[in-house]
């Protein structure tokens, strides 16, 4: 076995010991292999990883940013992700990242990046035109996918794999409107395989149920699929999905992910009109988008950037006063027993 193959094997072993979603693990393994390939081409000594310097990683970060014959170089965010994978590899090799000054991206020329969203909430005009054109092109399954994304906030892969759960979605969406249940549970196609819960936008409850019904009806007549690629499997279906998206004009700031932006903004506006404070609304939106309640601030910077400033500004004192008045109203609903505290 060659030295390079031995290093690939060691990287694979290190990667298996690190926690994370499957997709993250697959990407990390690829990043590690790319770095090892680069290292052998540029005389990096992997036999003694502790000698790898800040200068070597800086050169690699600059290499990643360079344009290629087929396109531009890696974005700053991608470079940061790849450097994180390399640091995991070096740590597994016993390198003291802190001592070697390799712990921070800024030390190797890959500093802070903007976390603001690059998409815009898709407008009704763009959305309706995309649905109409998809149907005209005979891509009815794609039209059903983007309707599910727009009204339930699904990711593209979740929409593609939703057919097994559509009947359940319909029942939960209807029950939620009637009985105030928690929401619609998503299992298939979720990020990292983690089940999540989304919710219905009250304003579009009828459209949501219709979108679920139509998608279920179509898939039942199409071998259980909304979109099928040239070859069996999800990879081919995803490739066709993105090809159709470009053909119907869902590109750039209105790429398919803009459908999730629109869902999030509509839900945030609904919460705002119900009097929910901005921070609380962002936490709820983060949960329904599948990012977890701890990502409220990030959701406000990405999905909610066009509506976050429409929430009433509240100070802590004003919030406390409002809370006290609400608690007082609740207390007054109970019969008085004459007791004191």
Image (tube, rainbow, N blue to C red):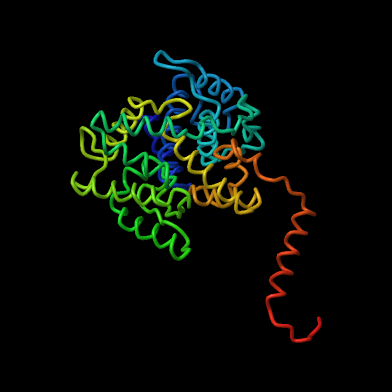
Q: How many marks?
A: 0
Residue occupying the point 26% across, 29% down: 136
Quadrant in which the N terminus is drawn: top left
Task: Looking at the picture, tell me which residue is in the foreground, 169 or 230.
Answer: 169
Question: Which quarter of the picture shows residue 105?
Answer: top right
**Residue 221, can we see it?**
yes
Give coordinates of residue 252: x percent, y percent. Answer: 45, 25
Q: Is residue 145 left or right of residue 115?
A: left
Give coordinates of residue 205: x percent, y percent. Answer: 42, 52
Residue occupying the point 71% across, 69% down: 329
Q: Is residue 42 above or below residue 336?
A: above
Residue occupying the point 44% across, 23% down: 40
Task: Looking at the picture, tell me which residue is in the foreground, 198 or 309.
Answer: 309
Task: Looking at the picture, tell me which residue is in the foreground, 178 or 302.
Answer: 178
Residue occupying the point 36% across, 47% down: 189
Q: Is residue 283 left or right of residue 205?
A: right
Give coordinates of residue 94: x percent, y percent. Answer: 55, 40
Give coordinates of residue 21: x percent, y percent. Answer: 44, 47
**Residue 19, can we see it?**
no
Task: Looking at the picture, tell me which residue is in the foreground, 78 or 210.
Answer: 210
Q: Is residue 315 above or below residue 7?
A: below
Residue ranking furthest to the top? 69
């Amino acid at each position: 076995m060659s030295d390079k193959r031995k290093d690939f094997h060691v990287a694979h072993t290190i990667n298996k010991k690190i926690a994370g979603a499957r997709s993250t693990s697959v990407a990390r393994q690829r990043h590690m292999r790319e770095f090892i390939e680069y290292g052998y081409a540029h005389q990096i000594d992997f036999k003694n990883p502790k000698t790898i310097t800040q200068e070597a990683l800086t050169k690699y970060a600059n290499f990643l940013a360079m344009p290629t014959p087929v396109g531009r170089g890696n974005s700053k965010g991608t470079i940061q992700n790849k450097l994180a994978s390399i640091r995991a590899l070096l740590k597994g090799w016993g390198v003291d990242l802190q001592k070697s000054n390799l712990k921070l991206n800024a030390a190797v020329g890959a500093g802070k990046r903007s976390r603001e969203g690059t998409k815009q909430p898709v407008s009704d005009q763009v959305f309706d035109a995309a649905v109409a054109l998809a149907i005209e092109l005979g891509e009815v399954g794609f039209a059903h996918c983007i309707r599910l994304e727009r009204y339930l906030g699904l990711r593209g892969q979740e929409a593609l794999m939703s057919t097994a759960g559509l009947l359940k979605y319909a029942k939960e969406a209807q029950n939620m409107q009637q009985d105030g249940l928690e929401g619609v549970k998503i299992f298939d196609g979720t990020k990292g395989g983690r089940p999540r819960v989304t919710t219905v936008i009250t304003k579009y409850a009828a459209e949501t149920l219709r979108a679920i019904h139509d998608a279920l009806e179509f898939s039942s007549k199409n071998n259980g699929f909304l979109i099928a690629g040239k070859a069996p499997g999800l990879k081919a279906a995803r490739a066709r999905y993105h090809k159709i998206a470009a053909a119907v004009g869902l590109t750039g700031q209105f790429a398919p992910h803009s459908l999730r932006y629109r869902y999030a903004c509509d839900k945030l506006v609904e919460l705002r009109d119900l009097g929910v404070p901005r921070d609380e609304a962002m936490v709820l939106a983060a949960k329904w988008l599948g990012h977890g309640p701890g990502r409220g601030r990030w959701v406000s910077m990405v999905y909610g950037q066009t509506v976050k400033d429409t929430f009433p500004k509240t100070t802590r004192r004003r919030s406390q006063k409002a809370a006290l008045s609400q608690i007082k109203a609740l207390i007054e609903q109970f019969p008085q027993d004459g007791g004191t505290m």
